[in-house]
Amino acid sequence: MAPTIEKEGTIAFKVEGVDKPCETWYKVFGDLKSGITPCVVVHGGPGLTHDYLIQLKDLNERYRIPVVFYDQIGNGKSTHLQEKNGDEGFWVDELFWRELENLVEGLGISDNWDLLGHSWGGMVGATFAGREPSPKGLRKLILGNAPATITGWVDAYNGYLEEMDDDVKVTIKKGEETGERESPEYEEALMKFFKKHTFGPDIPAELGESFGWATKDGTVSQTMMGKSEFVVTGGMRDWSAVEASKQISVPTLVVNGTNEGADDASIKPFLDNIKGVKYVKFHNSSHMGLYEEKELYLKVIGEWLLAKLA
């Protein structure tokens, strides 16, 4: 097999309300002119980076699907906007829709492309795809481990917290009540929770890179979500894609794992509202099927993307 073509760069992104020049950083694996529809990967967070999803590049090696990664505005290698910290009216879905449209236009793929959104990336992907008229050129949509409402995610996490060992549960609840979430005890307890309900027993190195970026600049995550994993105090406190999901008209694949934030109850509106939706559950994964069941995950995603439209 020929070596995978890699290309990275930046695309200028004019952001309303921002005086300085902004750029979206991207990286492509594969040939965007190969004739195979490219897949644009939208990372989670909000406030993480593309790094933790980089293993999706194997879709190009195995299935010849061109894969486009990018860091959302405010994150990673794209322009940071710390001056917008706390501005809930700025960090909204529409900002990320405009960036996505600008990206596919800049890459010359706006007439034919697929979208794979993971976690928050799937959430904003759902509201993006649910607009009328449908987004230009969007062929297929994957909602990966994404809840239809933020309250569904929070309810799932708080339910799991009640099932944790007493030492973990008590430590986390104490930190939530006092707001002291930076103590070693709280961080250790939260890590035990994450290992069970987010990424499995080991932290993937790529996920560590994304966490590192978020630690250096928490503007996006703190403004949109807040500082807690168990209550949303930021601008997304009332976020929902339930109504938007009723308008999604492109072929859609919904996937989730077991014992994760995007649990069966929180994704149910997608399954109820999206016409012809396909659903796959990864029974041996939590929130990161790409790591916990990589071979099966890539097979499901790759084969579905290559399947001919009905």
Image: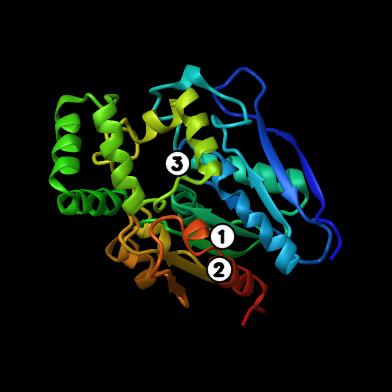
> How far apart in space, not on screen, are marks 1 and 3 (Cα)?
25 Å
Q: Nearer the viewer, mark 1 or mark 3?
A: 3
* Mark nearer the N terminus (1 vs 3): 3
Front tag of 1 and 2 = 2
Percent x, y for residue 64?
A: 76, 65
Give the CA distance from mark 3 to mark 2. 24 Å
Q: Which mark is residue 45?
A: 3
User: What amino acid does circle 2 point to?
Assistant: Val
Residue that badge 2 annotates = 250
**Mark 3: amino acid:** Gly
Judged from the image, the secondary structure of the residue bearing numbered disc 2 is loop
- How far apart marks 1 and 2 lie (CA) works out to 8 Å
Residue in the picture at 62% in, 74% down: 303
Q: Earlier in the sequence, mark 1 or mark 2?
A: 1
Q: Is residue 175 left or right of residue 277?
A: left
- Nearest the viewer among 297 and 79 is 297
